[in-house]
Each structure stands twice: as C-alpha cells, then as structure tokens.
Image (spheres, rainbow, N blue to C red):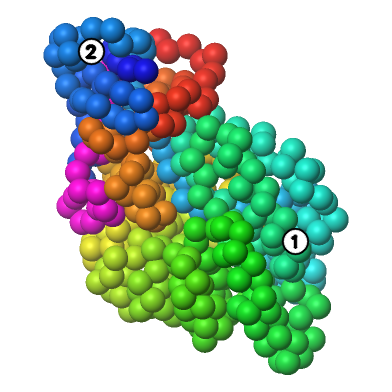
Amino acid sequence: MTLLFVNAKQVVTCAGAPRGRVGAEMRDCGVLTGTAVAVEGDRIAAVGSRAQLDARYESATVIDCGGGVLTPGLVDSHTHAIFGKPRYEEQERRAAGADYMEIARQGGGIHSSVRDLRARDGDELLALARPRLARLASYGTTTVEVKSGYGLSIDDELKILRVIKELAAELPMRIVPTWLGAHEIPKEARATPATRASYVKMLRENMLPLVVAERLAVFADVFCEPGVFTIDETRDLLLAARRSGLQLKLHADELAPSGGAELAAELRATSADHLAAISPGGIQALAKSGTVATLLPGTMLFLGKGTRPPARALIDAGAAVALATDFNPGTSPTPNLPFILTLAVSELHMSVAESVLAATVNGAAALGLAGETGQLTPGFSADLALFDVEDIRELPYWYADRRCKRTWVRGKACHSSDLPIT
C-alpha cells in the first residue's frame, strides 16, 4: 500500500547521516513547510512538495495531517517496562529524607520489584505490560528498548525476556530487547564475597548462554555503580556478552563518577546511559568514541536530585547525545518521551532541535538502528508520528501534555487518538 501524508504544517525530517549526530549537526532537525511524505509498503519513498507527490503517487491513500506536525516516530532507547506493582511508597520515603541507596539497603528499590516479579507468572506480566506499551506509543514513541532486570535468577530473567519477545511479535511497535541480569546483586548473593562472585559467574556461564540460545536479547546491559557492579565485574560480563554475539550497553555514572563512561568508551559500547555524575574524563572519553550518551533527566527529577546530566558539556565536547524516559516503577514512572524533551530544554539547556534529534536519530543510534529509523528520508523505515501542534517548538513547550494524534510503524498504523487537530 502507498500512503501520502499531506497538509502538515511542518514536516520534521531529521534528515542526514545515518549515525549519532554530534556538535553543530544537532542544531538543525530539518523542519520543512509545504511538504508531503510518500510511503510505499514499510519504507519512506519520497519527501517533497504535494504537487510533485500527488502527480507521482496518483493512487495513494491520502492521510490528511490537518495542520499538525509530522515527525519521525520517537525512539525511547532505555526502559524497564516489564514489572509488577508500582513503588509509590518510596516517593514518600524520599520526601521524608531517605535516599535511593538507603532505600535499597533496607530492601526497597530494585529488590522490592524483584520480590514482586518473582511471584508473578509470564501471563500476568504480559497483561500488565500491554497497556504500558500502549501508553508509551500514545506519546509518539514507535521504537522502544525494553530491559529485563527485575528477576535476577535464571528462570525469572528468562521469563521477562520471553514476555518481551511475545510483545515484540504481538504489538506494532518496534521493540528492542535487552538482557539486564546484572541490574543488581540479589539479596541472597550479598552474604559474602564468595556468594557475590558466584552470582557474577552464574550470570556469565549459566544465564547468558541460555539468553543467547533462545535469541531473547539484542543487547546486554550492566548497572555499573558503586554498591552495585564494579568496573571489573562489568567489564567481565560485557566482554562475555560480546563474545556471545550481543551488543553492549551500560548503566553508567548515575549517582557517582565511577568510571562507567570511560569503560563504555573502552569497550565501544553502543550506549552509556544515565551519566548524571559523569566525570570530565568520562565526557572526553565518550566524545572521542562512537558510544552514544543516553541521558535520562526524568530519573533525577523524580528522585529529587539537584544534579542533572551535563548535556551541554557532552554536546559541546562532541558526544552524540540521546534522550530516553527510563520508564520504570521506582525512579522514573513516566511513559511520556515528549516530557523528557521538556526537561532537556528547560533543565539541560538543550535547544529544541537538539532534543528532537536526541529522541529520534540519536535514540536510534543508541539502539544500533540509525540506518533504519529516526528520520523521514527515502529508504528509511516508515515510522512516523503526527502531533497536535503547529510548530515543533510546541512539543516540549506543552509540558506533560499528550499531543500525539497518530503514529505509524513500518507503514502500518500503531497508535491513534481522538484528539482534535485544529
């Protein structure tokens, strides 16, 4: 089927190199007016004037954008969408003065989600995940990375990854699975250095081969942070994952500058994520590498932290910067990627163009998909989002508002709403 998108007030193409954009490249997200977009099958076929495309695609099905803004589908490259109950009680504990690591030491945080998830079967997790993914889609996200990490045992991690695989087969969104068995050291493995070492060995020698054998993940990720996994443990696990054929990600330098960014650059990881506490050396390491710096400002906001990821320093140094929600039950319970763009502009001092590119092209680069999605350019996947605004600068301006009207993934309808386009 051929589709012809017309009557958009603006078409934001994000056209350019099929890789993470850096420096001055992030200043222009390709805003066009008087422009139509043609889709043939699952690919963008042409971008040009309506008169040209009307003549070229006479039999196309016309999609009237009604004066809205048409963009590439948004790419949310860091989520933890498979979980059981929310952890709203921790927000009150933080308000009373408890910090993230204190709550974790007392059995809360990730450990709380692990206990809850282990008590649920795959069907229940699948039923909980479907509406969450629908909410993500309703804000304009068409590609989403989803991690395991709330199981921390072989059976429970495989259970989560199988749920992600089923969702990817069932839903129209593009879903990228990540194995995060190294999300935390489970309580039962923290008793002694020997039990801790045994858990790391189990991840490497027992769990990882099963994940690979079932083709349940594209990426391996490790939470590299003081009190969680050390630099040496992280390197050990990620090198094993690479040998097994997985691509690499890191949770790095979220709460303290532990050298996670430097390790990500050393290992040529696809992305290093969080980075609110990245060191100057870490910034330079990422800038000299091809590793995407994925920033999650919603997490620091929700935790009530005064620190923010140093977006300007990273961009000015030449690093490719992406934005993502970190959607999870404890520290960033938002499916709203446009709200993350608001935080990027208002708190990280990014321009609108930088924030849009960070949530499209650079988000795709953070998933190894920069040659497939993230821009409205002939040959790319037909992943589009239509927003109820007249100017792309309104997308982060109407903060926390749901402005997405419709999305398409691979040329097929993904999400639609009854929002009027005026």
The amino acid type found where label 2 is placed reads Tyr
Q: Main secondary structure of the magenta part?
A: loop
* Residue 36: image location, x then y, percent: 24, 18
* Residue 273: image location, x then y, percent: 46, 62
> How far apart, in angstroms, are the residues tagged by discs 2 and 1?
50 Å
The residue pinned by badge 1 equals 156
Where are the magenta residues, as a range?
8-26
User: Does 24 appear in magenta?
Assistant: yes
Few, some or many residues within 10 Å of mark 2 (<14, 14–19, 20+):
some
* Residue 170: image location, x then y, percent: 61, 35
With 56 as the anchor, is 293 left or right in this view?
A: right
Residue 57 numbered mark, or none: 2
**Looking at the image, is 231 positioned above or below residue 160?**
below
Few, some or many residues within 10 Å of mark 1 (<14, 14–19, 20+):
many
| Pick the front one: 40 or 370 | 40
Q: Secondary structure at mark 1?
A: helix
Q: Nearer the viewer, mark 2 or mark 1?
A: 2
Residue that appears at 46% across and 75% down:
243
With 64 as the anchor, is 136 left or right in this view?
A: right
The amino acid type found where label 1 is placed reads Asp
